[in-house]
Structures are given as C-alpha cells and as structure tokens.
Image (cartoon, grey):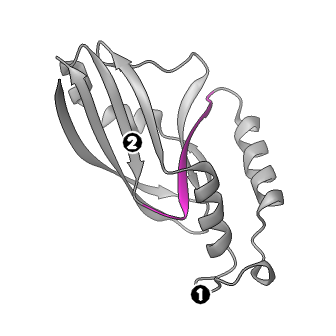
Amino acid sequence: MDIFQRTIHLEGFGQGIHCITDHITGQLPELEQYRCGLVHLFLQHTSAALTLGENTDPDVRADLVEHLQRLIPDDLRLYRHRIEGADDASSHIKSAVIGASLVLPFADGRLLLGTWQGIYLCEFRTGRHRRSIIATIIGAR
C-alpha cells in the first residue's frame, strides 16, 4: 500500500451546491498510478460541506438548497453566534449536519462512483470563498 496526499484548492464558487467531480479528478492525476484503493477528501472549512448527489438533474441540487434553508434558516434571531452575519451560524450548522469528508473507492485510475453520482461542494456562505480539500490516496500500485 502506498499513500499520497495533496491539497486541492477551489475558488470562485458562490452560495449553492456545486458539482466538483471534474475538479477533484483533474487535480488527482496520481490516481492513474494505482490499481485500486480509496480516496479520502477532507474539506478544511466549517461553513461548507462535501456530499455525494445526483449529477444529472439540477433540480435535485435546488431542492437540497431549498430544504436545508427551511430546516436551518439564515436568521440572526435564531442563533447566539452572530459575529459574521446572518448566514454564519446557519452555515456552521449545515456543515456539521452534512459533513466535511468523503471516502471514495477507485480502480484503474478512476473513481467508482455510481452512474448518477457526483461529488458536491455545498457552499453555505454568501460571496465567493477559497476552499481547500485535503485529498489522500491510499492504494495498491
């Protein structure tokens, strides 16, 4: 077993749920050097999240955004943590609920995602932020 690690930087994504599968695979050409293994993705932020979702119908992403907003609204009156604005505390809670990491299998240089699966960055803050993901490959060459 060999281990490889790299930091992947994502820039320019505004609030919403964004398919980043191509960004991830494009920045991990080392996958092609392995027969099989796992990729661990860890997002180094507390106001965004990583998840898997359907990669075909954009309405699925829109539904997720809408329902998360209903469950965890951006309303300062609901939170003690108010330092950075109305979307700050709610962003931290959404991140905690969805999570900051994924473990994905791969073989022969490609991720073994299902036909309709994609990797998604859930950006909960308004504005555009630079996000960093630590990608760790653990696999057999």
Secondary structure mostly taken by the magenta-highlighted segment of the chain: strand
> Image quarter for residue 19?
top right
**Three-letter code, disc 2:** Leu
Q: Observer-nearest residue: 60 or 38?
A: 38
Establish if 51 lies above or below 46: above
Per the image, the residue denoted by label 2 is 41
Relative side of 88 to 25, left or right: right
Q: How many discs mark residues in the rendered view?
A: 2
Label number found at residue 83: 1
Q: Is residue 51 magenta?
A: yes
- Give the residue displayed 40% in from the left and 23% down from the top: 105
- Give the residue displayed 49% in from the left and 51% down from the top: 100
Establish if 84 lies above or below 49: below
**Three-letter code, disc 1:** Ile
Q: Position of residue 49 (x, y in %)?
A: 54, 52
Q: What residue range appears in magenta?
A: 45-55
> Image quarter for residue 2?
top left
User: Seen from this angle, which residue lies furthest right?
Assistant: 70
Quadrant (top left/top right/bottom left/bottom right) for the N terminus: top left
Establish if 120 lies above or below 57: below
Kindly tell me whether residue 28 is visible in this rendering: no
- Give the residue displayed 23% in from the left and 20% down from the top: 32
Q: Observer-nearest residue: 51 or 22?
A: 51
Marks 1 and 2, how far apart at CA: 29 Å
Q: Position of residue 45 (x, y in %)?
A: 45, 62
Badge 2 element = strand
How many residues crowd around disc 1 within 10 Å: few (fewer than 14), some, or many (20 or more)? Answer: few
Badge 1 element = loop
- Give the residue displayed 76% in from the left and 37% down from the top: 59
